[in-house]
Image: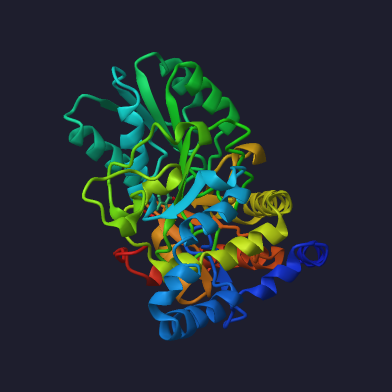
Amino acid sequence: MWPTDLEKALDAADPLAPLRARFHRTDPDLIYLDGNSLGRLPATSSSLAAEMVEQQWGERLIRSWNEGWFELPERVGAKIARLIGAQPEEVLVADATSVNLFKLALAALRCQPGRTRILTDDLNFPSDLYVLQGVVELLGNQHRLEILPSPDGVQAPVNLLQETLDDDVALVVLSHVAFKSGYLYDMGAVTAAVQSAGAWILWDLSHSVGSVPVELHRTHADLAVGCTYKYLNGGPGAPAFLYIRHDLQEQLHNPIRGWMGQQNPFDFALEYQPQPGLRRFLTGTPPVLSLALIEPGVDLLLEAGMAALRNKSVQQTEHLIALWAEHLEPWGYTLRSPRQAAERGSHLALGHLEGWRINQALIRELNVLPDFRAPDNIRLGVAPLYTTFTELAVAVERLQRAVAAGLYARYPHQRTPVT
Ligand SMILES: *Cc1c(COP(=O)(O)O)cnc(C)c1O
């Protein structure tokens, strides 16, 4: 009975369906719903990895730096720019998201002398809060970090943010899509409100890049950072990206200076002179292999187009909500994501008192891979490049069975280090 004719018809009518075959898959029965944490492996990434290692590294050796490696941070950045509505010279690939956030937040605060408040919310990714706490300390505790509380753990404190903005706010740092509930901020409205108070906005796009259309330039966003190993399918630990709006680039300075951001690194001058433009935000030598492997996943998203991906993603999360209401709510699952598609990214959080043990049953015996976010959220990530409607229906049946048949009760309460 699962999937029903409805899911079969939706899959048959899906214009993006052929793209699923462009990903590496060894277990045809595995239902992978964690593309929002680690995207699947694009088939061409395997062959590119072999070529990078055997030819570019193995044969060409040091010559490869002049045969494409040196420009990789801007070249791959320019491709990501097309996914987030930025201009090619506004996006650079470097370091981890947390490190880029540190660099941009510190640089921005230095451009806002006299303003002491930094605003964020409690839906934000904790690493972002840790980075900001560290920045405040490093600048001598002259700033105050204010973490605005969400009214219900699902919706962002949008009204509170509006009311709280004043001419003492230097910087507002928000996740465009919240990692737990999947709440999607209205980038245009928030950016305008922040800027009308004279503050700068720094968006973390980790959960929105490749999953919802992002329009940095049209919304006139100041700064952004984001991750490449989630919906971009760039591979575990692949370097992140940063965005600085064109007209701000000359005033911002990288607080982690290094030779890769120096004007002519191979002059080996003794005094630091930053490169013009974005490249000054490089520090050390980029991780060439994992940087290069970001490109095949980005190419697949560009081929599909963000509008088509968003259409499918909305259709899929709507379908999943309908299935939840009919088959899961009666078994104690609660919906912890916004009901309105316009306020939602591409994953759903379901709460359940036995969330951790259900998750274990799904992973260990039901061949479904979601993930778990404390205290009791099961996250179901929809990656429209490769997730099918059939998979969603089968996953719902297994979520129901895990409770209805008491399968979860065989698993311990104890958590593993990575959830
Ligand atoms: C995944 C994620 C990150 C990842 O940060 P790293 O420093 O690259 O590990 C940062 N912010 C958000 C909102 C995320 O979802």
Residue 98 place in picture, x, y as percent: 35, 49
- Say if residue 252 shows up in the picture: yes
Q: Quadrant of the C terminus?
A: bottom left
- Asked whether 215 or 388 is in front, the reply is 215
For this view, does 43 lie left or right of residue 336? Answer: right
Q: Is residue 78 above or below residue 361?
A: above
Residue 388 place in picture, x, y as percent: 69, 65
Residue 100 place in picture, x, y as percent: 37, 47
- Asked whether 170 or 54 is in front, the reply is 54
- Say if residue 146 shows up in the picture: no
Q: Quadrant of the N terminus?
A: bottom right
Q: Is residue 27 above or below residue 210?
A: below
- Asked whether 135 or 87 is in front, the reply is 87
Number of numbered callouts drawn: 0
Image quadrant in which you'd find residue 96: bottom left
Q: Is residue 290 above or below residue 167?
A: below
The residue at 47%/51% (across/down) is 92
Image quadrant in which you'd find residue 118: top left
The residue at 70%/63% (across/down) is 389
**According to the image, what is the colour scheme of the structure?**
rainbow
The residue at 50%/54% (across/down) is 74
Q: Give the residue furthest to the top.
A: 167
Q: Is residue 60 above or below residue 38?
A: below
The residue at 31%/63% (across/down) is 415
For this view, does 73 lie left or right of residue 339? Answer: left
- Asked whether 56 or 119 is in front, the reply is 56
Q: Give the residue furthest to the left.
A: 140
For this view, does 84 lie left or right of residue 200? Answer: right
Residue 331 place in picture, x, y as percent: 55, 55
